[in-house]
Every structure is written in structure tokens, then in C-alpha cells.
Image (cartoon, rainbow, N blue to C red):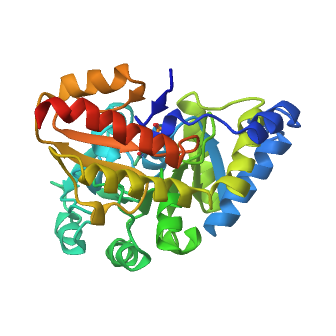
Amino acid sequence: MREVDLRSDTVSLPSPEMRKAMYEAELGDDVYSEDPTLNRLEAMAAHVMGKEAAVLVASGTMGNLISILTHAQRGDEIIVGDKSHIFRNEAGGASALGGVAYNTVRNDEHGMIDPDHIEEAIKPPNVHFTRTAMIAIENTHNMCGGSPLGSDETASIAAVAKRHDIPFHIDGARIFNAAVALETPVAELVKHADSISFCLSKGLACPIGSLVVGNEEFIEGARKWRKMVGGGMRQAGVIAAAGIIALEDMVERLAEDHANARRLANGLSRIPGISIDPEGLPTNLVFFNVDRGDPANIMREMNKLGVKGGSPSRRWRLVTHYGITADDVDYSLEVIASAMRGYE
Ligand SMILES: *Cc1c(COP(=O)(O)O)cnc(C)c1O
């Protein structure tokens, strides 16, 4: 049976070029900084982001965690969006492992945070208060429709952080989707950031891995925290080899995922019982509401026909990625339309 997996871009499989590069990778022990393939990936990542240094970590969650642990001390707080992945989807790691509190400010529907809200949330030095040790934004913003934040929006938040001398972090799990959608170099989007975490394992189609990027001193600190949380890897060049291919060959390709997402969004907007605003979907995440019928049944029906995705709630997210073609999108639309048909 035909299978189209639209649950997430994390399900994307490595390309044949990646598998070959992984097989052939020159290796060493990275805890001694002796893996030549990994050293090359870290240098490439630092270069593309316009920063001094980078360190490979196991996941985006680990990347954000060690960034927080490097910037903040026990008893400090970080300012994050109330719909941010750091706050909602990382199992409270900053507080459980770092003793760091979350101070949330409102994300608007595009994932933007009003700089004035951040200004108000920053705690002045006072014996009663936690110290604000980091301010973070997310780009693209996962829960807010996969919207990209432009360099002006980022700069307006960075300016507040700078004024108060607080480190500014970008959770850039999908920062390359933002760069491609906005046709802006990624270095421009992260210009004001003190640290960035980005995923190799989502739209860039690697099997494993994220990178944390920043200045030399920050990355030295982050390496130590990575070791402490058990993320020091050995012949990690097998992972890095795929990452090199990702940075070389898979970035521009993201435009195909965005085109397929638009195709999916346009098709969904024509299915009775689905409400979607195709204007607000600039990258590879397609959010919409299933207004008729029982979403759990519709999902089951659709999964039976090989299209994976959906949710038992009315709010759905489908994701285009490497391996999903325009034809797969058309097939998925037929399947969803037929699963909805009983509810017209
Ligand atoms: C996926 C994601 C992460 C975490 O990445 P994992 O590799 O799944 O741990 C962090 N931030 C955002 C915005 C994400 O979408």
C-alpha cells in the first residue's frame, strides 16, 4: 500500500548521498576533538551562521538545554514565548536539570513576541527577584503555524536583550526554513543572537543531530554541559557526515517542501468541513481545523489508506518534507477528502 507520512519532518529519511557519506566518513574520537568529519561540520555550521564556533548535540532539545545551562545559573529565569517548544515540549528540562525558572510572555499568531512585553518581564536586580539570564525566540515558530520571523522582528527583540545585557538565544530548529521562505541568508536572521540551536534531523533530513552555535567562550561552556548531560559522543563523524551533506545540498531544497505545503493548504481549503487560512502558511507546517465529524475517526480512516498524520482533536498539523512529492500531496488530499465525505 502507498504510504505518505505527514506527521512531521522528523520522519524524513537520509538521502542516498548521506548514507554513502556516513559509510565513507573519516572518523576519530570527538571527546578528544579528533573526529575530522565532525570538526569539519562544526566549522561549516559556525561559518554559515556567521559565528565563531559550533558543537554537535544529540537533539534540538539537548541543544536548547545546554544553551540554557550555559547562560543561566540555578535560581535564574529565562524569558520564553508561552507557545515555545522550550516551554511546552522539552519536559521542563531547564527547571529539572538546571534549577532554572521559565518566565513566559505571549506569542502572537505568528510566533512573534512584543518587545515591550519582554521589557516588562525582565527582572531588575533585587534580592527578591530571580535574575533574568536568557531571552529566547523560536524561528520558524512551530506551534504558531511554522511562521518565519524576519530580521527586523528579531532585531527588535535582540535590542531589548542587549539593552539589559541579557544573552539572546534563538531556537532555530527550523531556521533554514525561515531563511529559505524569507529569501534571507541565515546569518542575517541570527546576526544578533548569542546562541542558536538548529536541527539537522528535521527538514534537512539527517537521521540524528542538532548544532549549537555561538562564540568560542560560549561553545566551550556548552561542550562541558554537553559532557555533563551525557552528550559527549565518540566517532560522531558518522552523524556529521550526513550533516555536511545537509548543509551543502538540502537547504535550497526546502523550497520544494514549502511549495508542497502550499499545494496541500490550497487543496485542504477546498474540502468541505476543513477550515484553513492558506495565506498564513509560509513554510512546511500546515495547520488547519477539522470542523465536521469525529476527528479521531477521520484520522483512523485516513491512516488506513496509508496517509499518516492527524490528531483526535480538531486542530491538525500536517508536515511536508524530503521524500514527499507533489503527487503524494495530491494523493493525501484525495484520501482526506474521502475520509471527510461522510460528514458533508
Ligand atoms: C523539534 C523542535 C525542537 C527539538 O528538537 P528534537 O531534536 O526533537 O529534540 C526544538 N525546538 C523546536 C521549535 C522544534 O520544532
Q: Which residue is at a point 39% across and 47% down the rendered structure image?
A: 73
Q: Residue at x 62, y 62 (%)?
A: 252
Measured as percent of width and height from the top left, residue 66 is found at 49, 43
Q: Residue 67 or 237: which is nearer the viewer?
A: 237
Between residue 34 and residue 295, name the one nearer to us: 295
In the rendered image, the vertical position of residue 222 relative to residue 238, given as above or below:
below
Counting from the top left corner in percent of width and height, residue 153 is at 35, 75
The residue sitting at 49% across, 27% down in the picture is 3
Please state the horizontal and vertical placement of residue 313, each as a whole percent of the image. 17, 32
Would you say 112 lies left or right of 180 here?
A: left
* Quarter the C terminus occupies: top left
Task: Please say if 24 is above or below 305.
Answer: below
Q: Is residue 188 left or right of residue 17?
A: left
Q: In the image, ligand 1 is in what quadrant?
A: top left
Give the quarter of the image for residue 307. top left
Inspect this view and state whether residue 259 appears.
Answer: yes
**Residue 19 or residue 214, whichever sits in front:** 19
Q: Is residue 144 left or right of residue 313?
A: right
Does the rendering let one see residue 90? no
- In this rendering, is residue 115 above or below 136? below
